């Protein structure tokens, strides 16, 4: 599914929320690519904007173009390797805030549905019990509104479009989702209501646990990851861990 028009927001050009000599974190706006696309007109991205002032900046993880929120970048190769390894071993924890269509009945729950690329309709993904990769999302209701529900989403795995497909499968598509929402759930909103609010990880130099938080601009949000997961405060020994698929 080709991008018909790409007009990313430009104000602010870059919103840096944390920086030291090893890492840099930004608040990516909805509508901006994380990394450049294949075509020249799609070069503008969070990474390419940072590269203007930080030539050695390295991508560690990505957000969908329509998703806003926290992105962490490495400022050198050592930090890049250290952070990517944490994602591979699922040592990071993430919190997203979403507004979904309808009223989510349970106050909290768990979604375990395997996901695979919907190849004829890519980049869409779909649930597939035969060939899909295990995918798990925890959710908590933050607020129930007239026609929608604000939820906190805590992905345990990190599959492409995982949160978007899991909420659709629950019967509550994220509003403004061009791929998975229909009717008023899509038509009444000017953006995907999904925001990456919080990330915990181990600092690549000190190896101490660190948390970064970016408030959501369309719904209430707060830092909760230390309470929900109680991770070790110091980077564990990789020899005692198993790399995740």
Image (tube, rainbow, N blue to C red):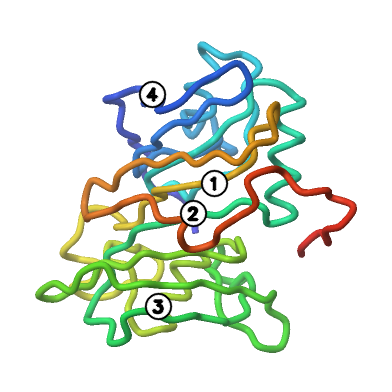
Residue 171: quarter of image: bottom left
Q: Are marks 2 and 3 in contact (CB under 8 Å)?
A: no
Q: Nearer the viewer, residue 24 or 128?
A: 24
Mark 3: secondary structure: helix
| 193 to the left or right of 179 | left
**Mark 1 sits on what residue?**
200
Spatial CA span between label 1 and label 2: 8 Å
| 167 to the left or right of 184 | right
Residue 10: quarter of image: top left
| 129 to the left or right of 122 | right
Q: Residue at x 55, y 19 (%)?
A: 20
Mark 4: secondary structure: loop
Q: Earlier in the sequence, mark 2 or mark 3?
A: 3
Up-down relation of residue 213 to residue 169 (above or below): above
Spatial CA span between label 2 and label 3: 28 Å
The crowd level at tag 3 (other Cα within 10 Å; few <14, some 14-19, many 20+) is: some
Q: Earlier in the sequence, mark 1 or mark 4?
A: 4
Query: What number is the disc on residue 14?
Result: 4
Q: Are marks 2 and 4 in contact (CB under 8 Å)?
A: no
Q: Residue at x 27, y 25 (%)?
A: 11
Percent from the top left, x then y, of residue 143?
Answer: 20, 69
Query: What number is the disc on residue 168?
Result: 3
Is residue 66 visible in the rendered image? The answer is no
Mark 2: secondary structure: helix
Spatial CA span between label 3 and label 4: 32 Å
Q: Nearer the viewer, mark 2 or mark 4?
A: 2
**Mark 2 sits on what residue?**
226
The crowd level at tag 4 (other Cα within 10 Å; few <14, some 14-19, many 20+) is: some
């Amino acid at each position: 599914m080709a991008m018909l028009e790409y007009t990313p927001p430009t104000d602010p050009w870059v919103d840096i929320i944390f920086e030291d000599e090893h890492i840099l974190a930004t608040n990516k706006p909805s509508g901006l690519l994380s990394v450049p696309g294949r075509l020249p007109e799609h070069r503008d991205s969070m990474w390419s904007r940072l590269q203007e002032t930080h030539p050695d900046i390295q991508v560690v993880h990505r957000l969908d173009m329509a998703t806003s929120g926290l992105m962490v970048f490495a400022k050198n190769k050592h930090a890049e390797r250290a952070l990517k390894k944490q994602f591979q071993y699922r040592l990071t924890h993430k919190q997203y805030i979403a507004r979904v269509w309808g009223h989510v009945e349970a106050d909290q729950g768990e979604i375990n549905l395997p996901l695979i690329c919907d190849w004829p309709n890519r980049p869409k993904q779909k649930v597939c019990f035969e060939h899909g990769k295990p995918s798990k999302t925890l959710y908590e209701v933050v607020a129930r509104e007239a026609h929608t529900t604000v939820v906190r989403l805590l992905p345990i795995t990190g599959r492409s479009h995982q949160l978007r497909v899991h909420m659709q499968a629950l019967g509550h598509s994220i509003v403004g989702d061009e791929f998975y929402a229909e009717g008023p759930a899509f038509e009444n909103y000017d953006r995907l209501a999904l925001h990456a609010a919080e990330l915990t990880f181990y600092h690549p130099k000190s190896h101490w646990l660190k948390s970064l938080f970016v408030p959501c601009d369309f719904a209430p949000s707060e830092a909760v990851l230390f309470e929900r997961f109680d991770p070790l405060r110091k980077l564990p020994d990789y020899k005692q861990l198993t790399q995740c698929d």
